[in-house]
Image (cartoon, helix red, strand yellow):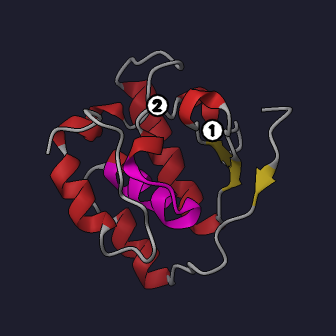
Amino acid sequence: MATAQLVQAAPAIEIASEEAAALAALADPLIAAALSVMAFTLAGLGSLRITRDLDITGDVSAIKLHGVGHRHCPLHAIPAWARPLLAGARAHHRLTAHPPADGVFAPVMLAEARYLRAHAGRLPRLDLSLPAGALVP
């Protein structure tokens, strides 16, 4: 992450405290965190598929998303409202004995693809395009 340039949270998307509380109330910490990342990065589901524990800074202040062929892998600042959600996803990932190199959101990408797409569709201006075969419809 030392060579990555930090990208600030998308200014067009401000999450009100009620909306952050609604995300935190979701039963699955991975889904809450995935939707949060999509909201402040404007990333699609495909970008989350390979996001690893190693891609989140130790203080949960930044997350690195990977581009196709790793040609463009931006480092995004994590807004204060999303930090507890990402910390919860990281804790869930670690408590389920996944190695740090495994995808944090991978367990929900296939099982909850429809759910994620439905809720992500409510977030403004998201590109929900996926690489072919990335998710089961």
Question: Where in the figure is residue 13, as x and y percent of width and height?
Answer: 56, 78
Task: Tell whether position 66 is magenta.
Answer: no
Q: Mark 2 sits on what residue?
A: 50
- Which residues lie in the magenta part? 31-45
Residue toward you, 8 or 54: 8
Cα distance between the residues tagged 2 and 1: 12 Å
Q: Which mark is residue 70?
A: none
Q: Position of residue 29 (x, y in %)?
A: 35, 49
Q: How many marks?
A: 2
Q: Dividing the picture into quarters, in which one does residue 58 lie?
A: top right
The image quadrant where one finds the C terminus is: top left
What secondary structure prevails in the magenta region?
helix
Q: Residue furthest front?
A: 132
Residue 2's place in the image compared with 13, above or below, is: above
Q: Amino acid at mark 1?
A: Ile
Local secondary structure at mark 2:
loop
Q: Amino acid at mark 2?
A: Ile
**Picture residue at 59% right of the left edge, 56% below the top:** 83
Of mark 2 and mark 1, the one earlier in the sequence is 2
In the foreground, 132 or 8: 132
In the rendered image, is residue 127 in sight?
yes
Residue 2 quadrant: top right
| Image side of residue 89 versus residue 73, left or right | left
Could you tell me which residue is drawn at 57 percent across and 68 percent down?
Answer: 81
Q: Foreground residue, 24 or 2? A: 2
Residue 38, horizontal then vertical, whole percent: 47, 59
Q: Residues within 10 Å of mark 2 (few under 14, many from 20)?
A: some
The residue indicated by pointer 1 is 56
Q: Position of residue 43 (x, y in %)?
A: 50, 55
Mark 2 or mark 1, whichever is nearer to me: 2
Q: Is residue 61 visible?
A: no
